[in-house]
Amino acid sequence: MIDMQRFFMGVSIALLFLAFLCLYRAIWGPLITNRIVGVGAIGTKTLIVLLLMGLIYDRLDMFVDISIVYALLNFIGTLAASKYLEMMGEV
Amino acid sequence: MDTMTIGSILTAIFLLLGLLFFTGGTIGLLRLPDFYCRMHATGKSDTLAVLLCLIGLAIYNAFAGNFALPYILVSIKIIFIAMFWFLAGPVSTHALYRAAFRCGVKPWTLDNQFKEVDKE
């Protein structure tokens, strides 16, 4: 029997490490398009970390709803940023 | 071998596969030369990684509740997030690609491969 709580904690820490690596693109990315990509990548990792938090604290039924809202907001945020960029014309 | 062990092993396999694809996407996002290559790496592999991780978590939740109805409903919600992200990830990638191309971000080609393509 694997100790699943500890395994979920390890996967969460690995995902947070990868999210910090993506923060490099979000801060120092050469153009604004690179920054949008970095923020989107951080959002997808946070989606998984939220569900793992729910499994660690045994409240998955609540965290699933938060995760749905997070996925929707991430999608709409990227679409809105790209539409704004397209209407501005020049990067 | 009881059912909980089988569920745990399946969950571990799916989560580790998802973590592998997340790592590949992050390395591509950090190391590739221009915006289009970075978007290509991270857009595809992050979508697949989210899909694998969510399927693993849904399997674990269904096995942990011993297939009782409330746990099954939560698992179906997780599968719905996976289906939504399977549609939304490529759509947002494509929208950002098109916006960047229309704004005049230069792609990295054979002619300009030794110059800095995207500068501030």
Image (cartoon, coloured by chain):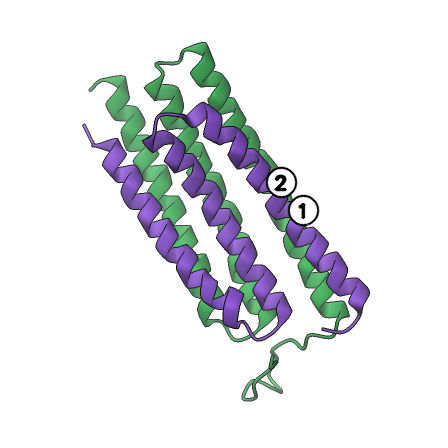
The chain under label 2 reads: A
The chain under label 1 reads: A
| Quadrant position of residue A54 | top left
Q: Position of residue B99 (x, y in %)?
A: 73, 63
In this picture, is B51 found above or below A20? above
The answer to whether one can see residue B95 in this image is no
Residue at (63, 55) in percent of width and height? B93
Kind of residue indicated by mark 2: Leu
Q: Is residue B62 left or right of residue B97?
A: left
Q: Is residue A35 left or right of residue A61?
A: right
Q: Nearer the viewer, residue B10 or A34?
A: A34
Q: Position of residue B49 (x, y in %)?
A: 46, 46
Q: Colour of chain B?
A: green
Q: Is residue A59 left or right of residue A70?
A: left
Kind of residue indicated by mark 1: Ile
How much space separates mark 1 and mark 2, taking CA atoms?
A: 6 Å
In this picture, is A30 found above or below B81? below
Tag of residue B105:
none
Q: Colour of chain A?
A: purple
Q: Which residue is mark 1?
A: A76
Q: Secondary structure at mark 1?
A: helix
Residue at (51, 48) in percent of width and height? A44
Asked whether disc 1 touches disc 2, contact meaning CB atoms under 8 Å apart, the reply is yes
Q: Quadrant of the C terminus of chain A?
A: bottom right
In this picture, is B23 found above or below B103? above
Q: Quadrant of the N terminus of chain A?
A: top left
Q: Position of residue A50 (x, y in %)?
A: 44, 39
Q: Nearer the viewer, residue A80 or B5?
A: A80
Q: Which residue is mark 2?
A: A72
The answer to whether one can see residue B14 in this image is yes
Q: Residues within 10 Å of mark 1 (few under 14, many from 20)?
A: some
